[in-house]
Amino acid sequence: MRIVALDYGVARTGVAISDETGTLARPLSVVERVDTALGFTTLLELLAREAPGEIVVGLPVSLDGREHEQARRVREFVGRLTAAVSQPISLYDERFTSKLADQRGGSAGRDARAAATLLEDYLRSRDG
């Protein structure tokens, strides 16, 4: 089953996808302004095209585990997404994903690389 990870952001949302076995993650794309009608439609079209069995959305939490304003925005986005898709959606701690994506580098956009890092962590967590 393929899994899509979303690194939500107001300006850009990174998208990554796993292989069918759920062991490898790769950056897929970046969707601009998913809070707008056009951006949300673009995301829904991408999800329909890729047909994942599950969607994972990064939840930003502080180092001490508390949620702040961005986490509230993510939860609102997930509510909207839940109403629009049939796949199960999971929230997963995204601490350090952007920094790790920067350290690893690559040719894909930073947000897509951050989504891939998030997805790699999520896939590893399911193995244990």
Image (spheres, helix red, strand yellow):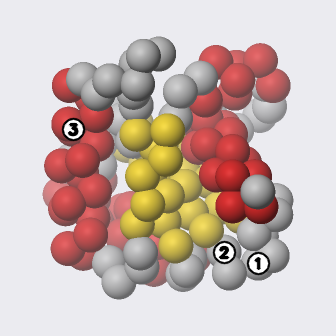
Residue occupied by mark 2: 2
Q: Amino acid at mark 2?
A: Arg
Kindly report the distance in space between the C-alpha atoms of the residues bearing marks 2 and 3: 26 Å
Q: Is residue 48 above or below residue 82?
A: below
Kindly report the distance in space between the C-alpha atoms of the residues bearing marks 1 and 3: 30 Å
Q: Secondary structure at mark 2?
A: loop
Labels 2 & 3 near each other (Cβ < 8 A): no
Labels 2 & 1 near each other (Cβ < 8 A): yes
Report the residue at 81% width, 76% height from top. 21
Q: Earlier in the sequence, mark 2 or mark 3?
A: 2
Q: Position of residue 71 (x, y in %)?
A: 28, 34
Q: Secondary structure at mark 3?
A: helix
Residue occupied by mark 3: 73
Q: Quadrant of the C terminus?
A: bottom right
Q: Position of residue 10 (x, y in %)?
A: 29, 34
Q: Position of residue 11 (x, y in %)?
A: 33, 32
Q: Earlier in the sequence, mark 2 or mark 1?
A: 2
Q: Position of residue 36 (x, y in %)?
A: 19, 49
Residue 126 figure quarter: bottom right
Crowd band around label 1 with a 10 angstrom C-alpha radius: few (<14), some (14–19), many (20+): few
The answer to whether residue 112 is seen in the rendering is: no
Q: Is residue 121 above or below residue 51?
A: above
Residue 98 figure quarter: top right
From the viewer's side, name the closer residue of 84 and 124.
124
Q: Amino acid at mark 1?
A: Glu
In the picture, the disc for residue 20 is 1
The tally of labels here is 3
